[in-house]
Amino acid sequence: MTEQTTEEVVESVEDVIVEAAPVQETDPVAALTADLQRLQAEYANYRKRVERDRALAHELAIGAVLTELLATLDDIERATEHGELTGGFKSVSDQITGITTRLGLEKYGTAGDEFDPQVHEALMHDTGSDVKVPTATKILQPGYKYKERILRPARVAVTDPSETTAE
């Protein structure tokens, strides 16, 4: 290949490239509008993310406070069971119980519930012929949850069905 043919090939390739990519005229208004729309979408996403994070932080803060109050609620319940809660202390306990209920604290765990290791903590174990599935037969300490989040599992005594061989 000669030098002249090489130059002709390069020129023809350049002509093809110019024809394939026509000059695009950029409209400054369209470009600025596209930038504005992109920024508005980014800001909307930012606001949603911040609001979601704020709601989560609020829930976690309430959950932490309620977790700290669980020991007090247990003491109030024991005092009520023993008849030691009277007078002004009864009024205070009713207010504390009412506030925690309004905030969304739920007490769970009743004797006779099927044992679920996700929400129960087994502290004692027994076998019996009166149950067909592992059952929480005695609630040693009630469990509490806040908005589907377990703050403390119910501490229970579990009774498993007795092993009988059917022949």
Image (cartoon, rainbow, N blue to C red):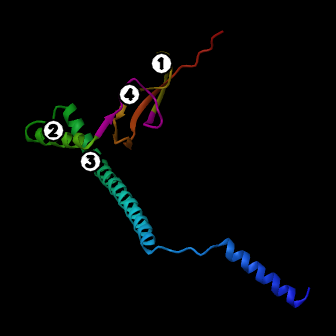
Label 2 SS: helix
Q: Judge depth for marks 1 and 2 and give the one in front.
A: 2
Which of the 4 image quadrants contains residue 36?
A: bottom left
Q: Residue at x 39, y 36 (%)?
A: 155
The kind of secondary structure element at disc 1 is loop
Quadrant of image for the C terminus = top right
- Front residue (pair 56, 152): 56
4 and 3 marks in contact (CB < 8 Å): no
Q: Is mark 4 on a helix, strand or loop?
A: strand
Mark sitting on residue 131: 1
Q: In this picture, is 52 found above or below 106? A: below
Would you name the residue on which mark 4 appears? 138
Q: Which residue is drawn at 36% across and 54% down?
A: 52
Q: Earlier in the sequence, mark 2 or mark 4?
A: 2
The residues colored magenta run 105-123
Q: Is residue 42 above or below residue 158?
A: below
Q: Circle 2 sits on which residue?
A: 94
- Label whose residue precedes the other's in the sequence (1 or 2): 2
Disc number for residue 69: 3
